[in-house]
Image (spheres, rainbow, N blue to C red):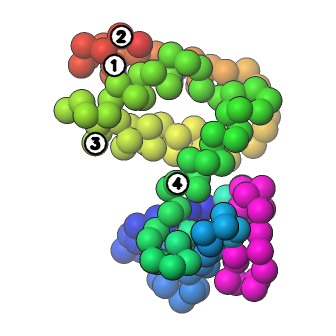
């Protein structure tokens, strides 16, 4: 998982004891994992995310944080292959929030809903596909209500 802001808790203490994993991105687009002292692929970075690993991606020359950019690149590749998660309508609505007064709230709203979904999934395990589809339906309804409250068509 990409780096998160530290919160004052027991988790923050355990994270503080563990050094941050740094992936360096070179101008030739190669990615170097300083923890394993080896070059890695985008697919291997995706695996780190899937395993819940905490890391940061930095430009090898400037030290600029490129983590968000790399995560977006992974999402783009996932959306381009197989079954996309986001419909064109969802993507268009996300774009409409940029520059909108509610832009700052949209990220928090999406994050909160995803955390709720993941919590429910972990509590239930993979017991029922029906429950997941019901939750997805509920989230779609909530999102439509949220958008319509600010005069944006879902």
Q: CA distance from mark 1 to mark 4?
A: 26 Å
From the viewer's perspective, is residue 64 above or below residue 108? below
Q: Residue at x 46, y 77 (%)?
A: 63
> Which mark sits nearer the N-terminus, 2 or 3?
3
Picture coordinates of residue 34, whole percent (x, y): 67, 83
Magenta residues (range):
32-48
Q: CA distance from mark 3 to mark 4?
A: 18 Å
Please identify the residue farthest to the front as the structure is shown.
28
141 displayed left or right of 80: left
Q: CA distance from mark 4 to mark 2?
A: 28 Å
Residue 118 visible (yes or no): yes
Does the magenta-highlighted stretch encompass residue 37? yes
Task: Give the numbered dot on residue 147.
Answer: 1
Q: Please name the residue that numbered disc 3 is placed on.
A: 104
> Which mark sits nearer the N-terminus, 3 or 1?
3
User: Label 2 near label 1: C-beta < 8 Å?
Assistant: yes
> Local crowd at mark 4 within 10 Å, few (<14), some, or many (≥20)?
few
> Local crowd at mark 3 within 10 Å, few (<14), some, or many (≥20)?
few
Which residue is more in the foreground, 103 or 69? Answer: 69
Q: Give the SS element for disc 2.
A: loop
Task: Give the numbered dot on residue 153.
Answer: 2
Q: Residue at x 42, y 29 (%)?
A: 94
User: Label 4 near label 3: C-beta < 8 Å?
Assistant: no
Q: Give the SS element for disc 3.
A: helix
Which residue is more in the foreground, 33 or 17? Answer: 33
Which residue is more in the foreground, 52 or 63? Answer: 63
> Which mark sits nearer the N-terminus, 1 or 4?
4
């Amino acid at each position: 998982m990409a780096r998160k802001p530290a919160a004052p808790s027991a988790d923050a203490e355990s994270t503080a004891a563990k050094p941050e994993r740094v992936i360096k991105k070179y101008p030739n687009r190669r990615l170097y994992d300083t923890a394993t002292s080896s070059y890695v692929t985008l697919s291997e970075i995706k695996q780190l995310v899937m395993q819940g690993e905490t890391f940061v991606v930095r430009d090898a020359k400037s030290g600029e944080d490129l983590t968000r950019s790399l995560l977006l690149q992974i999402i783009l590749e996932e959306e381009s292959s197989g079954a996309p998660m986001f419909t064109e309508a969802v993507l268009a609505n996300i774009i409409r929030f940029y520059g909108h007064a509610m832009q700052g709230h949209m990220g928090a709203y999406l994050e909160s809903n995803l955390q709720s979904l993941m919590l429910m999934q972990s509590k239930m395990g993979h017991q029922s596909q029906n429950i997941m589809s019901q939750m997805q339906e509920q989230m779609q309804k909530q999102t439509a209500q949220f958008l319509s409250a600010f005069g944006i068509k879902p």
